[in-house]
Image (cartoon, helix red, strand yellow):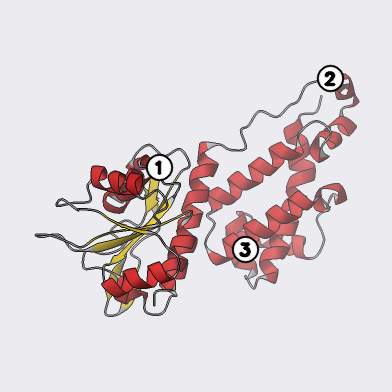
Amino acid sequence: MKFLEEVVVEEFLPTFRSLLAADLRERGLTQHEVADLLGVSQSAVSKYAHGDVTVRDSVAEDERVQETVERIGEGLASGDVSQVQALVEAEVLVRRLSARGDVLADLHEDAMPALADYDGDFRVHDPESEVRVRERVLSSVRRGLRLLEHASGFATLIPAVGSNLVECTPDAEGVEDVAGVPGRILDVLGQTEIPADPEFGVSEHVATVLLAAREGGSDACACLNVRYDEDVIAVLEAAGHVTAAFDPEGEPSGDAVRDAIEANPDATVLYQTGGFGVEPIVYVLADSAPEAAEVARDLV
């Protein structure tokens, strides 16, 4: 009796690690850095590099394997993908390759011919698990933050209360389903300061605007707030954005934002011009955090 997990360990894992180690080395990472990211020893990385580990051709030549290796390698090298997300993506790949008639399933049948008479499917994990969805959102926010961090002049768009770049899960119900920057993005001596990696449930202000906009009918999954200025609104409108104003009522009121979207369903920019003790703010809505960041980058 041979378990599918044994096939994964013996056939898939050495091949996948070899391909990923080679990808990371080609991206300029040191042997030590690759070992840390993969959770293996430097001697193991050396064996991968010198071809001392047996590679299963049917796995290595699969386009889905190659695409996943490239995507994870790029993300790990840039820091946009966490080790948790890399693990989840690899696990999902394993489950897909384990479907009846697929690469790992065929290797399993080769090792255990009796399975050929079985009509079922051994896949038991959901490829769209909550962990995977949330890790993808965090990765998207990281990419957006990287764009803002390297956007020359973005600090000039940060309001006194600070900015935040947020993105929610597809089925977000509350602030805990929205990822953002703890402590907000700040202007420190003319430089964009991002104090920490994104987390879920840390942005009540901008997350509230995003969630209210979605309640009003917006399809946006991301939001970024910047300082208000008539010229900023003019540039956004000239770029084709539909803008809509709302009354802040002391804080971003969910009702006011929702009403603004219901009245202007195509709006991709919301703004309020301030009030007593309330700083005027512009909110950019977008499909993803990187897209919201690109809009802001074009403003400077």
Please, what secondary structure does the residue beneath circle 1 have?
Answer: loop
Residue linked to disc 3: 74
Using the rendered image of the protein, determine whether residue 209 is visible from the camera's viewpoint.
Answer: yes
Coordinates of residue 274 in the picture (x, y in percent): 17, 61
Can you tell which mark lies on residue 217? 1
**Amino acid carrying mark 3 in the image:** Glu
| Circle 1: residue type | Gly
**Image spot of residue 31 (x, y percent):** 65, 68
- Can you say which quadrant of the picture contains the C terminus? bottom left
Taking the spot 80% from the left edge, 30% from the top edge, the residue there is: 100
Give the structural element (helix, strand or loop) at label 2.
Answer: loop
Q: Residue furthest left?
A: 276
Q: Measured from the top left, where is residue 8 in percent x and y?
A: 74, 40
Which residue does the numbered mark 2 point to in the structure image?
A: 118
Quarter of the picture containing the N terminus is top right
User: Earlier along the polypeptide chain: callout 1 or callout 2?
Assistant: 2
Q: Kindly tell me whether residue 142 is visible in this rendering.
A: no
Q: Report the disc number at residue 102.
A: none
Mark 1–mark 2 distance (CA, rounded to whole Å): 47 Å
Indicate which disc, 1 or 3, sits on the residue closer to the N terminus.
3
Q: Position of residue 118 (x, y in %)?
A: 84, 19
Q: Is residue 130 above or below residue 208?
A: above
Say which residue appears at 26% left-offset and 44% top-offset: 254
